[in-house]
């Protein structure tokens, strides 16, 4: 079942992505869009790093930057640095970023 909402939302400086991070996973990967407890959409991501000293957050940002072909410096965790549920802001033009990331999601996840 495909969630109706998108994890991507325009923000003042670019695009915000709501996600749920699972640390200590078997491998680093972007799982896809899933519904959260409130009925919204979140991007589910898994990393092998442990949630200590910011290691999981660093692995998350590195994975997303590589996957989306964006500079690592364009990604910032703006909410949930110590929580599984996070909001990441991608600096740039939301009108250009959102279609690009939606296209990436369509190509890489069923």
Image (tube, rainbow, N blue to C red):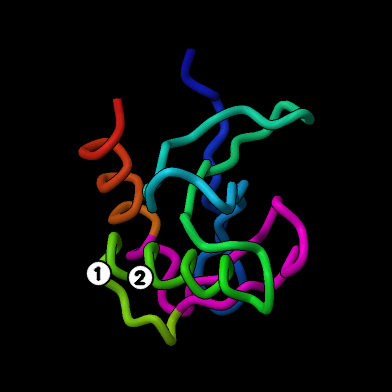
- Say left or right for 4 vs 62: right
The mark total stands at 2
Q: Is residue 37 above or below residue 73?
A: above
Q: Residue at x 47, y 68 (%)?
A: 59
SS assignment at label 2:
helix
79 inside magenta stretch: yes
Q: Position of residue 45 (x, y in %)?
A: 49, 47
Labelled disc at residue 69: 1
Magenta segment, which residues?
75-97
The alpha-carbon separation of the residues under discs 2 and 1 comes to: 6 Å
Q: Nearer the viewer, residue 49 or 37?
A: 49
What crowding class fits label 1: few (fewer than 14 Cα within 10 Å), some (14-19), or many (20 or more)? few
Q: Position of residue 7 (x, y in %)?
A: 55, 45
- Residue placed furthest toward the bottom: 73
Q: Residue at x 24, y 39 (%)?
A: 108
Q: Are marks 2 and 1 in contact (CB under 8 Å)?
A: yes
- Say left or right for 97 vs 21: left
- Say left or right for 83 vs 106: right
- Residue placed furthest toward the top: 1
């Amino acid at each position: 079942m495909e969630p109706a909402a998108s994890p991507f939302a325009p923000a003042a400086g670019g695009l915000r992505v709501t996600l749920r991070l699972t640390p200590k996973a078997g491998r680093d990967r972007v799982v896809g869009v899933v519904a959260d407890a409130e009925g919204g959409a979140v991007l589910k991501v898994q990393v092998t790093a442990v949630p200590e000293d910011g290691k999981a957050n660093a692995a998350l940002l590195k994975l997303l930057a590589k996957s989306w072909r964006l500079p690592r410096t364009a990604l910032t965790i703006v909410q949930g640095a110590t929580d599984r549920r996070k909001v990441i802001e991608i600096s740039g033009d939301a009108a250009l970023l959102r279609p690009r990331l939606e296209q990436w999601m369509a190509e890489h996840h069923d």
